[in-house]
Image: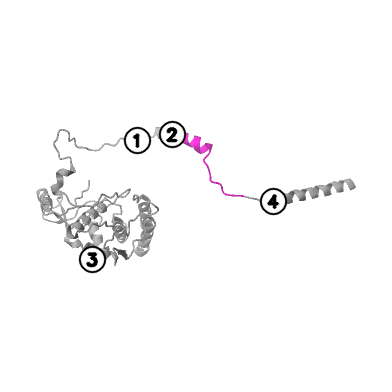
Amino acid sequence: MKKILTFGLLMSLGFTVTAQNLGKDKAYFKEYEPGFYQNFILKDVHAVEKKQMQKPKVKRFTMDQSGMDLPNKVEMYKDHTYWHLPSTSQGNTGTCWCFSTTSFYESEVYRLNKKKVKISEMYTVYWEYIRKAKAYIQKRGNSNFSEGSEGNAVTEIYKEYGAMPRSVYDGLKDGRKFYSHAQMFKEMYGFLKAVKKTNNWDEEAAINTIKAIMDHYMGTPPEDFEFEGKKYTPKSWLKDYLKLEPNDYVEVLSYMQQPYWQKVEYEVADNWWHSKEYYNVPLDVFMEILQEAVNKGYTASIGGDV
């Protein structure tokens, strides 16, 4: 019995000494590195799937101009060229209506005041989404909410919200070089559909949510700003710096679906607010108007829907 107790005591002391020498537990975060599953199995799966996917062939209508003697150099148009800023990419957005019309107004500012200035497209886009969301709420979902719009929407935004330089608000965040509104629009449209589904037509709350989504992806437009040493609001910059009067501009189209010589609605989805401010004239008169604008050195913005 004495031998057994001595052995037990020695074993106990041994365990105590060993436990004291282990030290504290240690752990750390290690960056995950793809292994066999990712580098071989998944690559094989994706390679086979890529082969199995048949890419549809896209055909586009193209005019055959072979054998035709057509002007093919910019220099040949030197008598009918007008100042404009370099083209700006709209990126992955459905905002061509804004980029083209903004360019038109930039050329107008130069024609009228000899100022070369880049106007923010995204300031206009921001408030156009607000207008669309309000109409969607007020009409209980029976108003088109999409990325598209028409050129005269820019004029309407200028009247109500003014304009600002792109250097003050460019709508690009997180180091982006090109615009992408896919995820932003998906969230806004998804939210509005949920509003319709739940019949929760609280306009103020809904608009605040739409703003919050755009603020996240585009940033919040400032209420006032400094430009060339002076302080402006968007409305005062439009009036005092750009010196643009939106009411001086009219919309003209040639539209066989509606009577000529009167204002009509341009019946396309992008005219979501059903504007009836388009002067409808025969095609030959439409072309004469463009020619007269060229002869007098005016600028014109031409748009269309296919």
* Residue located beneath label 2 in the image: 47
| First-in-chain label (2 vs 4) | 4
**Tag of residue 240:** 3
Residue 152, how many percent across, how many down? Answer: 22, 56
Please tell me whether residue 150 is drawn above or below residue 237 in the rendered image: above
Please tell me whether residue 304 is drawn above or below residue 71 in the rendered image: below
Residue 170, how many percent across, how many down? Answer: 32, 56
Residue at point 20% right, 61% down?
246
Q: Is residue 43 magenta?
A: yes
* Residue located beneath label 1 in the image: 55
Measured Cα–Cα span from mark 1 to mark 4:
61 Å
The magenta region covers: 27-47
Q: Looking at the image, can residue 43 be seen?
A: yes
| First-in-chain label (1 vs 3) | 1
Are the residues tagged 4 and 3 within 8 Å (C-beta)?
Answer: no
- Residue type, label 2: Ala
- Residue type, label 4: Gly
**SS class, disc 4:** loop
* Residue located beneath label 4 in the image: 23
Q: Is label 1 or label 3 in front?
A: 3
- Residue type, label 3: Asp
Measured Cα–Cα span from mark 3 to mark 2:
60 Å
Measured Cα–Cα span from mark 1 to mark 2:
15 Å
Which of the image's four quarters has the C terminus? Answer: top left
**SS class, disc 3:** helix
**SS class, disc 2:** helix
Q: Residue furthest right?
A: 2
| First-in-chain label (1 vs 4) | 4
Q: Residue furthest front?
A: 229
> Depth check: 210 or 30 in front?
30
- Residue type, label 1: Lys
